Image (spheres, grey):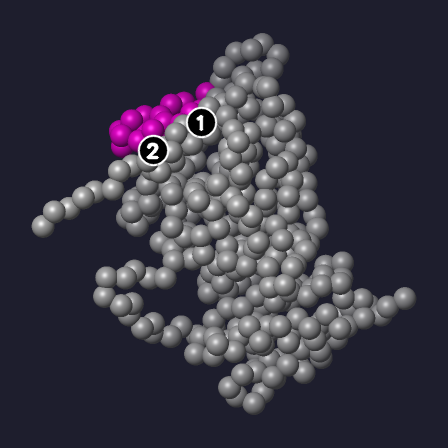
Amino acid sequence: MSDKITEEKIYQALASVPMPGNGQNIVSANAVSGLVIKDGHIAFSLEIDPALAGQADQMRRQAEDAVARLDGVLSASAMLTAHKKQPAAPPPAGQAERPMHQPARHLIAVASGKGGVGKSTTAINLALAMSARGLKTGILDADIYGPSLPRLLGLDKKPQAEGKKIIPHEKYGLQAMSIGFLLDAESPTIWRGPMVMSALEQMLRDVAWQGLDALIIDMPPGTGDAQLTLAQRARLAGAVIVSTPQDLALIDARKGLNMFRRVEVPVLGIIENMSYFLCPDCGSRHDIFASGGAEAEANRLELPFLGAIPLDMEIRQASDAGTPILISQPDSPHSQSYLAIADQLIAQLDEQQIAAPKIILE
């Protein structure tokens, strides 16, 4: 029987890895953070000066190998991040900031200005709806602090690695990746902004996404640095805004919408989630959060109103059980609503593909 894996043993192993540039090891240089131990799987972050980026991959491999050699360790994963912001060299004239790796033909952000509006449930059902329409689809849970994809898909295991690439989980025909697959569900993610951005970029760049037509990105709620950077650098085909009908939610939804417009990402439309409640006993409709607010906002802004999804126990129960409504009840009216929204999104993506280039004569 192997000895219990402890933080002390892991740090002792990591102390054998030299820190590039200063003669210390990575532990004495305070480069190790965010250590998580889960069922023999170890994850941690390595923070280095951006000036030493050329040596970072070697250091990461050495750190992972040092931990992997410990008795009882099944796998070791290190994420790189920069701890000190350096002024970046300006890009050559006429070139924009280097974009993130493009893992699919179409990257679609599902966003909201605030949490609690059912954005993640909407994202997973839209991904499944697009898959049902014949698109090879993936879903990326970009909420580092509150990942929900493991629960929505009923997955609680670490993904496998092949070389330097992480193999995404596959379930219900979707390729899926979330930080929640790598970290303990009950451990808080206490990461600074640069660490979050490094993790997001690695989940786009270092995951072996295979031949995707569309990647649905379940964005973090709000309009902070992570959301803005993804919007600027991930070459999004467009964004879908999810809101509930009441005025307070719409105020926050406008902030998210305006963020995408400011960075010139097309807004593909607005979904009104928890739009109404149908009493299962008497069949009467109740507008708990008012009704029609998101549709009115879409009309005001001359954006597509993609549809209204009710507040329904079956949608919630299916999501909590790890069998989203499109899987558990594919012929239900709710599933048909998601499929109708997917049809509208696919039509917009097709229009983007066939749009003729502009010819400018000087």
Membership of 288 in magenta stretch: yes
Q: Amino acid at mark 1?
A: Asp
Label of residue 14 in the image: none
Q: Amino acid at mark 2?
A: Glu
User: Could you say which quadrant of the image residue 269 lies in?
Assistant: top left
How far apart are the two marked residues, 1 and 2, measured between alpha carbons?
Answer: 12 Å
User: Could you say which quadrant of the image residue 77 lies in?
Assistant: bottom right
Position of residue 196 measured from the top left corner of the image (x, y, whole percent): 50, 60
Instruction: Please determine whether, in this image, residue 54 is positioned above or below residue 355.
Output: below
Membership of 126 in magenta stretch: no
- Identify the residue at image location x=50%, y=54%: 204
| Segment tinted magenta in the rendering | 287-309
Residue 2 in sight = yes
Instruction: Please determine whether, in this image, residue 122 is positioned above or below residue 36.
Output: above
- Identify the residue at image location x=39%, y=46%: 236
* SS at badge 1: helix
Residue extending furthest toward the top: 282
Quarter of the figure with the N terminus: bottom right
Of residues 347 and 360, the one drawn nearer to the viewer in this rendering:
360
Of residues 35 and 58, the one drawn nearer to the viewer in this rendering:
58
Position of residue 76 measured from the top left corner of the image (x, y, whole percent): 68, 66
Residue linked to disc 1: 343
Position of residue 63 measured from the top left corner of the image (x, y, whole percent): 64, 74
Give left or right: position of 92 versus 327: left
* Sequence-earlier tag: 1 or 2: 1
* SS at badge 2: helix
Residue extending furthest toward the right: 1
Residue linked to disc 2: 351
Decide: few, some or many residues near mark 1? Use Cα within 10 Å; few <14, some 14-19, many ≥20: some
- Identify the residue at image location x=59%, y=19%: 331
Residue extending furthest toward the bottom: 23
Position of residue 188 measured from the top left corner of the image (x, y, whole percent): 61, 57
